[in-house]
Image (cartoon, helix red, strand yellow):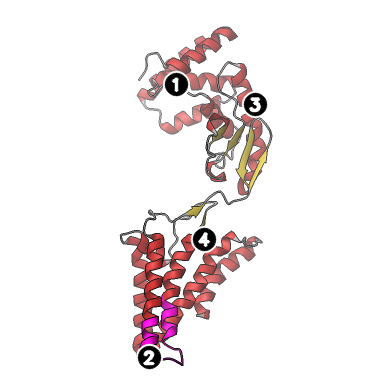
Amino acid sequence: MFLSWLVLLLPPAVSLARAGTFPTLDSLRLPLMGLVICVAHAVVGFALGSFLPRLIATPVVAVVDWIAVAFTRAAQPYWLRHVSGQFSDIGFGEVPRLVSVLAPVLLAGGVAAGVLLLWLPFGPRVVRGVLAVGVAVSGVLGAQHIARDWPHTPPMAVGRAPVDCTGEKPRVCLPRVASGNLSRAQSEASEVLGVLRAAGVPGAAPARIEDPLVGPATAGSGDRVWRMNLMSADRPHEAGYQVMVRALKFRCAQVPLVRARSVWLWAATRTDQVDMYQERRRREGLTPENKQVESLAGAEVRDVLDRSHAEQTRWIRTSLDSCAGSGT
């Protein structure tokens, strides 16, 4: 049992020590669950070893125990994997809810408690046997009842990573691990939104911009809170370009490609994001069709930029509202 605890705790302890990081209460949920399950498995293994020859019991129990847990990952229904104690799909800022760690502890602990009842030094053996079976079955059925309706992923608490925010209108929020880009992202977002609002782009006024890894979206936030992948925006103008594209909200489901590219190129020119726009287009591949689309969009944008401010405002609002125009 102590060797299993060592295997469970030593690798993360070394990693935490090298990183100079202290564990949080949330991060201790899975290790504590693992410690309890290790004790339960050790109790069951010791009980079997006391009845079977050790030369047979040790390898057989080790292999059967591993197979019983590992193969639940590829088995149906899903509750089998949830009561086994496997957690392999944990995302950034997520932690299993207490009920998610209760199910495997209840199953393993119930079986172990039933085995322990057989070792009680008093009472008739038949009574102890009935109690042991009752406790073990109760633990198994209780765990199955808890997890029977869970989907592929058990209940998880999300948005538990530390978050830093800065600025106002918009207030930009990032997970603390990426907060080194926070000030630049807020500055770019504020500048781009200011230019687009002055140019007549409607709706370019979010109160808050946050990365999806900050946590789940707040109900009813609507257009006041924009969510975009700012953690990956580690180069200049990347955050600004994402904000620019998000601000250009078309009011129709199918947007002609030339019209969409014209709108983006116009906004990129107005907000000094042309280099980033061209880089995104190169990533898509410079096929003959894409080159033709870019040529048509460039010609339209040059014509629009020669117009007055009022005419450009009418053009961008018409482009976003009607999506009319030729294109592929």
Name which of mark 4 and mark 2 comes first in the sequence: 4
Q: Is residue 308 left or right of residue 122?
A: right
Residue mark closest to the camera, 4 vs 1: 4
Quickly name the residue at label 1: 251
x and y, in percent, of residue 61 in the image: 36, 80
Q: Amino acid at mark 3?
A: Glu
Q: Secondary structure at mark 2?
A: helix
Q: Amino acid at mark 1?
A: Arg
Query: On residue 98, which mark appears?
Result: 4
Query: On residue 191, which mark appears?
Result: 3
Distance CA(mark 4)–CA(mark 2): 36 Å
Residue mark closest to the camera, 2 vs 3: 2
Name which of mark 2 and mark 1 comes first in the sequence: 2
Q: Residue at x 59, y 9 (%)?
A: 309
Q: Do the residues under discs 2 and 1 have CB atoms within 8 angstroms?
A: no
x and y, in percent, of residue 129 in the image: 37, 85
Residue mark closest to the camera, 3 vs 1: 1
